[in-house]
Image (cartoon, rainbow, N blue to C red):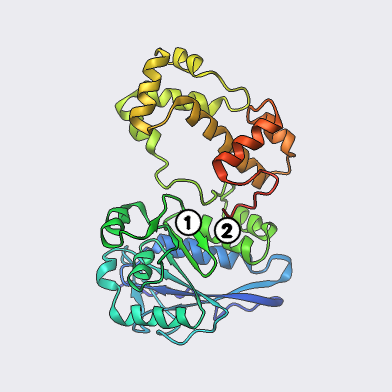
Amino acid sequence: MTKPMNLSTAAAQPVHTVAPKKYVFLIQEEFSHLSFTCAVEALRMANGYRGKHYYDWHIVSESGEPVRASNGIAVSVDGGLRELDRRENLLVVGGDNVEIHSTTRILNWLRREARRGVTVGGIGSGAYTMARAGLLIDRPVTTHWEYHKTFTEVFPAVDLQETLYSIDTDRMTCAGGASSMDFMLALIERDFDRELANVVSEKMVYTNPRSHFHTQRLSLQIRAGARHTKFADAIEIMAQNIEEPLSPVEVAERVGLSGRQLERLFKKHLNTTPKTYYTGLRLQKARELLFHTNMSLAEICFACGFNSQTHFSKSYRAKFGVSPSRDNGRL
């Protein structure tokens, strides 16, 4: 039998405490070990920076006993479903067979803690448990793409997003898997500042964290390319020519297609035009540079192929709903 892991902070001695933020992880049976570990490790790596202790966390389960993840690893917990401090942030970590593991006891506990003012979040299919508890009404919701069909059938009124995570005041949800890192980095920035989030990102050797607006299924180009290699080649050419963008006709010529043929492929696979997709790539790159470099807006504008800052700002606002000068990453 696998020896339980203990990932709590009980044995960790803070170097210097400065009002640490408190998190509680409810791990359900068959939870995603990857999602859970990525989230906890982000908090652990924050502690100690500049000699300060930023986070405390505890792990709980319904029974108060160790819980086995979907990969078979058993994880020790600090206790059962206790009454939480309102300052604690509760994250429900789901996994396989979430319908079965969203028990009446867990649902009632979540409802009670939410009524008491505790901030509640879900990682992966943990969002399903939150929805079952009625905590996601009129809230943007993110969950793993494998659960989208179930969500739309069981909770047709839920505002389901295609993004990596959603943070909405006292409710927050995440797709799980590796996106738990992106999610926690956003929370670390919210809790403290971007400097600490960047430090944690570097410690995790995760040097290109994604913002919430990124879609989950980034393999779309690959999957479409398997059916039409010239389409995949066209996307790759666009991605490699951001600073000096080509015209759609030039892209088509490089892959041996006519402009009309390229238009049809983009309509079929992405339901958009080559021009719109290309502009989106450049704006996405601009947002990454805005968040993760010290480049000026003028430098970013020209690095992403825009000839004027006016055009750049107008395009940026049209896509993200905010001007680049005011964007803080939490749309």
Q: Image quarter for residue 140?
A: bottom left
Contact check, label 1 and label 2, Cβ < 8 Å: yes
Number of on-image labels: 2
Q: The disc labelled 2 sits on which kind of residue?
A: Ala
Look at 47% across and 56% down and name the residue there. 165
Look at 70% across and 45% down and name the residue there. 325
Q: Residues within 10 Å of mark 1 (few under 14, many from 20)?
A: many
Q: How far across and how far down the image is residue 100, in percent?
A: 24, 71
> What residue sits right under mark 2 in the picture?
186
In the displayed structure, would residue 168 be above or below residue 59? Answer: above
Q: How far across and how far down the image is residue 83, in percent?
A: 46, 87
Residue nearest the observer in this picture, 263 or 125:
263
Q: How far across and how far down the image is residue 320, in percent?
A: 56, 44
Look at 38% across and 37% down and name the residue there. 220
Residue 200 left/right relative to 106:
right
Task: Say which mark, if any, is on residue 165.
Answer: 1
Of mark 1 and mark 2, the one earlier in the sequence is 1
